[in-house]
Image: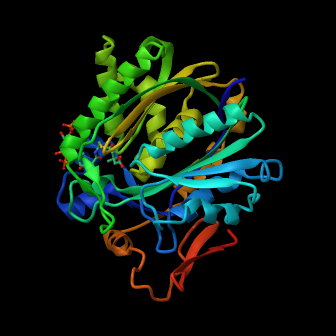
Amino acid sequence: MSVGIDDISFYSSGMFLPLATLAEHNGEDPDKYRIGLGQERMGVPAQDEDIVTLAANAARPLINSDNRENITTVLFATESSIDQSKAAGVYVQRLLGLGSNCRIVELKQACYSATAALQMACGLVARKPESQVLVLASDIARYGFDTPGEATQGCGAIAFIVKANPRLLAVHAETGCYSEDVMDFWRPNYMDTALVDGKYSTIIYLKALRQSWKNYHEAGGLDFGDFSRFCYHLPFTKMGEKAHRKLAVTNGVSMDVELLEKQIGSGLLYNRQIGNSYSASLYIGLLSLLENDQEDLSGQNVGLFSYGSGCVGEFFSVTVQPGYKQYSRRVQHVDMLETRQELDYEGYASLFSHTCPKDGGEHYFPSEAAGHYRLAGIHDHKRIYTETGD
Ligand code: HMG
């Protein structure tokens, strides 16, 4: 019996800022963002969107009458948590109409936590093969205006179902991990924006990659040459390119532009359009690969590197299942990205300065969300989620 990802879908906000607009405002060469960081657009959440609505919108296409009652666990990965106590997945359970015989928990370790969720989900399914686990990862990346990280902001959510004999991806048991107590990126509870030592964070990311790969190999994992594709955590897509070059050098493989494009190019497309979605980022990259690669990847191995600042890294691998293409939601995902509303700088600045009120008062938000779910307001310290009818 294999265990892995049976179905997968993603969502990002219905609004975006072109990074060329940001470059113009910040007095930067647009090529710094387009080529230097490898980013074109940044997803900008509406006032009535948060990690719950993003995740519920991502998961909605995956839920049907066959699996609604069979999902026994919901794991919600995020570092943009909305509550110190209640797991965001409990709201999603209600919005999606999932059965009540379900365990739900929230996980945190910067951008890494969705991978912990995936591994835990595989363990649960291996123990009870008839069960299904819904994994959600949802984040809004905020660094603040005029910071070096500003151009790498974004938002997005991924949802996938882990089950026995999956239709899309079998997850291998071998993994390699690396953890170290470092301060490359963090967000204290009293702040809405992340603190980051940007250049240092890219060095630690690459160190964690090398060490995770070594540990993966020691655990009996595959060789570099056994993989046809690779996916990396993508704070910005150029980071994935740097990581892949580093891994190739570590393995004595010479990496030219053509091979780089073949091995990671199709996995970068969606992230370039939405920016960093923290915990969801690696998996939106994986989805981009499955939906956009020109080759039939059936039976081929994909290597994945998950990184969360602070830090935890994990290298692991999957095999693409024959027939995976027939379950693709590419048309819907591309349509979602292409029909987003473009913002000018002022529109972005006004939306990004909006953070959920903390005064304990009664607040209702304008109806802006493009998806099926929205955060209508806050009443009596409770978030009110509603359906838009779209
Ligand atoms: P910066 O210092 O403003 O940018 O911010 P820079 O001067 O280093 O330029 C960036 C690149 O653009 C450079 O390329 C320049 O040469 C190039 P590189 O040398 O790196 O290959 N460049 C140009 N290229 C073409 N035409 C031009 C041009 N000008 C410059 N005209 C930095 C960069 C990444 C530091 C900043 O964006 C930042 O702080 N970002 C946030 C932190 C981050 O994303 N770190 C990544 C690793 S940590 C991670 O992934 C975890 C994270 O997701 C959080 C979590 O785990 O929760 C962040």
Which residue sits furthest right?
A: 65
Residue at image point 45% right, 27% down: 230
User: Which residue is more in the foreground, 34 or 319?
Assistant: 319
Q: Quadrant of ligand 1?
A: top left
Res 324 seen here: yes
Q: Residue at the bottom extreme?
A: 362
Residue 169 spot, x, y in % from top left = 63, 30
Identify the image's colour scheme: rainbow, by chain, secondary structure or one colour. Answer: rainbow
Q: Is residue 258 visible?
A: no
Measured as percent of width and height from the top left, residue 380 is found at: 54, 86
Residue ID at (62%, 23%): 296
Residue 370 sits in which quadrant? bottom right
Nearer to us in this view, 279 or 152: 279
Please provide percent x and percent y for residue 6: 69, 37
Indicate the quadrant containing the C terminus: top left, top right, bottom left or bottom right.
bottom right
Q: Residue at x 73, y 49 (%)?
A: 71
Which sits in the foreground, 24 or 125?
A: 125
